[in-house]
Image (cartoon, grey):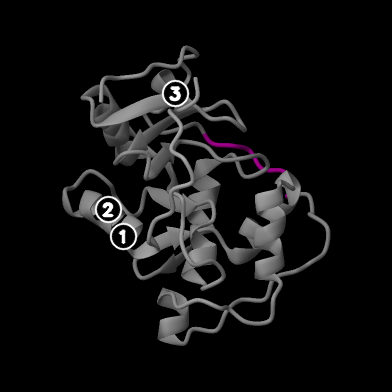
Amino acid sequence: MKPPPDGNRIYSGHGLLGLVRDLIEQGRFDPQEFVIAGSARLWVEGYIPALSDLDIVAIGSTWDNAWEMALSGEGVFFEGPLNHAKLIRLHGNRIEVSNSWLSPYADPYRLIEEAEIIEGLRYPSLATVADYKRRLGRPKDQTDLSAITSSTARYSSPATASGRQRPAVSTSAPQPLPRRIQRPLAHGNTPRASQCRPVTTRR
């Protein structure tokens, strides 16, 4: 089941991150238990001016709390269009939470461990974002890749405002990841996420 259409809405990155920080302050999200994936890192680095939503990969109590929010009507369950994983949309489709990411970055623990911390929040490296966008190859991804490989960031962002030097990004073809044993998900993740039937809760 796909989420209801949300048009072509775009949001301020500051506003979206503010919603995440609110969830942290409420004790629902633990910043050690999630990474902000998707295009958010591009906004942080000043490559794009706004975002359509935030993609969050979560484990542990953060994933459990997102699940409970959907059960209580504060969010909506649906099936991811790319990897068919169980996902949860919060705050009117502005935040999308899952407990896995796209192959070959499906292990949430590894994604979180290898993330880079910017202003207290975890993001995949710019190289990781470029790699999976290169693998997906959608028109949107090609546009983002062109922005990433440009010489300068065009938009004001947390990274550009702080004067932090942007990391270099390789333009070469994707490289296979080293083989690694994937650890089991934390207690509470597997039974719920393994349910095959998508469910929509009342909003």
Q: Residue 135 location in percent, x, y?
A: 74, 47
Q: What's under tag 1, amino acid-wise?
A: Gly
Q: What's under tag 3, amino acid-wise?
A: Ala
Q: Quadrant of residue 181?
A: top right
Q: Quadrant of residue 126?
A: bottom right
Are there few (<14), some (14-19), or many (20+) residues within 10 Å of tag 2? some
Of helix, strand and loop, which one carries label 2?
helix
Are there few (<14), some (14-19), or many (20+) residues within 10 Å of tag 3? some
Give the residue pinned by disc 1.
Answer: 15
Relative to 60, residue 168 above or below: below
The tag on residue 24 is none
- Toward the right, the furthest residue is 173
The magenta region covers: 177-183
Q: Nearer the viewer, mark 3 or mark 1?
A: 1
Q: What's under tag 2, amino acid-wise?
A: Leu
Q: Nearer the viewer, mark 2 or mark 1?
A: 1
- Asked if one can make out residue 178 in the rendered structure from this viewpoint, the answer is no
Callout 2 touching callout 1 (CB < 8 Å): yes
Give the residue pinned by disc 2.
Answer: 19
Mark 3 vs 2, N-terminal side: 2
Q: Nearer the viewer, mark 3 or mark 2?
A: 2
The residue positioned 46% from the left and 32% from the top of the image is 5
The tag on residue 193 is 3
- Where the C terminus falls, by quadrant? top left
The residue positioned 46% from the left and 62% from the top of the image is 50
Q: Quadrant of residue 81?
A: top right
Of helix, strand and loop, which one carries label 1?
helix
